[in-house]
Amino acid sequence: MKKSFIKVASCTSDIYLGDLSKNIDSIKKNISLACEKKVKILCFQELNITGYSLMDLYKHEEILNESLKALLDIKNYSSNKDIFIVVSLPIEYKCNIYIAACAIFNGHILGIQLKTNLPNYQEFSDSKYFSPSFKYIGQIKIDDEMIPIGNKLLFNCTNCDNLIIGIEICEDLWAPISISTYHALNGATIILNPSASNELIGKDQIRKDLISITSRKLNCCYVYANAGFGESSQDVCFISHNLIAEKGQIIAEKNDGKNGLLITDVCLTSLSYARKINSTFKLEHDSDYSVIDFMFDDCTTILTRTFSKTPYLHITDFNLQKILHLQTQGLKGRLNSLNIKDVVLGVSGGLDSALALLVCYHTFKEMKLGLQGIHAFSLPAFATSTKTKNYAKDLITALGIEYNEVDLTEILKKHLEALNHPLNVYDTVFENIQARERTAFLMNYANAVHGIVIGTSDLSEIALGFSTYNGDQMSMYNPNGSLYKTVIRKLIEYIAEKSKDDQKLSKTLLNILNTPISPELIPDKNMQDTERIIGPYILHDYFIYHFLQNGISLADIYQMAKSSFKDQYDSHTIFKTLKIFITRFIANQFKRNTMPDSPKILDLSLSTRADLRMPADMKYEDLLKGLKEE
């Protein structure tokens, strides 16, 4: 069954060293709470049945016997509960003692994963008390059932596609080649880690980095459950730092020093899609692995995860500065390769052309070229407002660049007369003739000064085809082509803040930010508010990211967006905008097939020379089949 999401949890249960009955009560309590929260996969910390701090006492028969009885108690407690549970305890097998993670489901122990890498350095001494896992799959008899035991176990959910669970234990993650690497290369999409990692200053960040990098390189979900309060503080401290990562992003974290549950929803579709598009991710099909099947009664997940409204945007001053730097380096490389010192661009008084002009300015400064080589034009026509024309002039002059203005109105009237087109009919011809005349002027002027035309279209417009073919769609180099409209807003905001000492520049950029986005091609201003026509750009950017970057279905994107934007847009607005997105995206591939060179800066490019290859003559009906308004 195709399910896009599964609810997972990591948990630090309470530990009472020397009192297993209280430990079991805590485990049961958390299992019940997880079931109430509709969790399907629950991972407890390392040795949570006994506690991690017993040291030499692990070898005593009383401890081993009581912990095994506790395991059977938990197994029986799991009966008729639709949840996959991992608990951890010391297990004796053929006169050796191992740290074990037991997978339990609906009254059965499915398998026992053993810890392979035993730390014996600094504060750790696991190898003094335990043996490392053997390299084969054995069988251990527990409660009259033969159960697979070893370090090559996978748990496959037969009624939920792309859900295969692997387990590694604490140090197995920190080893040069982690056990999770082998699990993932043999199909595991979710890795569970029962851990007992003590806390040191700065170690929490190291832990986060390691888990996020592991989830990224393995294209998996990583669920990490750590030891916490109740463990011995004789030599070290534990504070139950729990984490859940998905493809390199920490999507849930609990680091408050309190034991308990950390719950979130994991996107299985996104994990599967990431592996399908990654040509270096090759399954190994290791015959030594034992794959144990299980089946949920109900795989349905009601989303409770909070999804970022801007998942493509990691907002830091450093990242924003780096985006501008990469744009500058791209344009610098192009000018160097062509051995030219002149650029030409139209400046409308809007966001995109403002950023393109700023990129040109910074590039010329870095290359120590005279600003006279930046030929910036305002090209007013039928619907250009005085306000935006003034913004364009203010921005150009604030940067110390010569302002040029060429009114195209009379030229456009002659074009329309030649077409026998009335001046008061505001159709596609009326709009596109303005965009194409502007581009023609800029191209011809670039020829005259031996320069190149700098494009301004952003990734959002390119995805939606919201440009005129062979008009503003075309240029000789476009520094904005892989930036979402939302990102460009943040960049302009950032540059305005950094330019406070230059009041004219800062004020102009803020004025541009606060002006509704419009192509200004029709005199009726109400008809030319872009976001009234096609919907909010922040929604489109969200759709673009999840559809193209994560391969998520439109139906699931709709549910996610309703959760993300519930405080901002009603479900009808989201549904309508999503339909506009997919219909425009599919219909406008022909424009993307001829898009100019543009450097890839964020995770996504729409260039057919880079990330996106698709036919220009396909339909969108199949993609819409599962999408229903709710």
Image (spheres, helix red, strand yellow):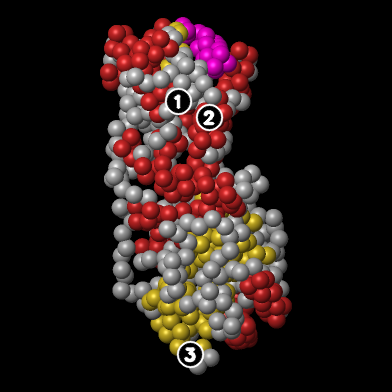
Query: 321 or 512: which is nearer to us?
Result: 512
Tell me the crowding category of disc 1: few under 14, some 14 to 19, or many 20 or more residues within 10 angstroms, Cα based. some
Residue type at tag 2: Met
SS category of the residue bearing label 2: helix
The residue that label 1 is drawn on is: 426
Between disc 1 and disc 3, whose residue precedes?
A: 3
Tell me the crowding category of disc 2: few under 14, some 14 to 19, or many 20 or more residues within 10 angstroms, Cα based. some
Residue type at tag 3: Glu
Percent position of residue 178, x then y: 43, 61
The residue that label 3 is drawn on is: 145
Quadrant position of the C terminus in the picture: bottom right
**Residue shown at 50% from the left, 33% from the top:** 485
Query: 266 or 77: which is nearer to us?
Result: 266
Residue type at tag 1: Tyr
Magenta residues, as a range?
385-403
The residue that label 2 is drawn on is: 527
Reply above or below: 175 against 37: above
Percent position of residue 91, x then y: 53, 80
SS category of the residue bearing label 3: strand
Residue furthest bottom in the image: 144
Q: Are marks 2 and 1 in contact (CB under 8 Å)?
A: yes
Horizontal side, residue 366 vs residue 76: left or right: left
SS category of the residue bearing label 1: loop
Secondary structure mostly seen in magenta is helix
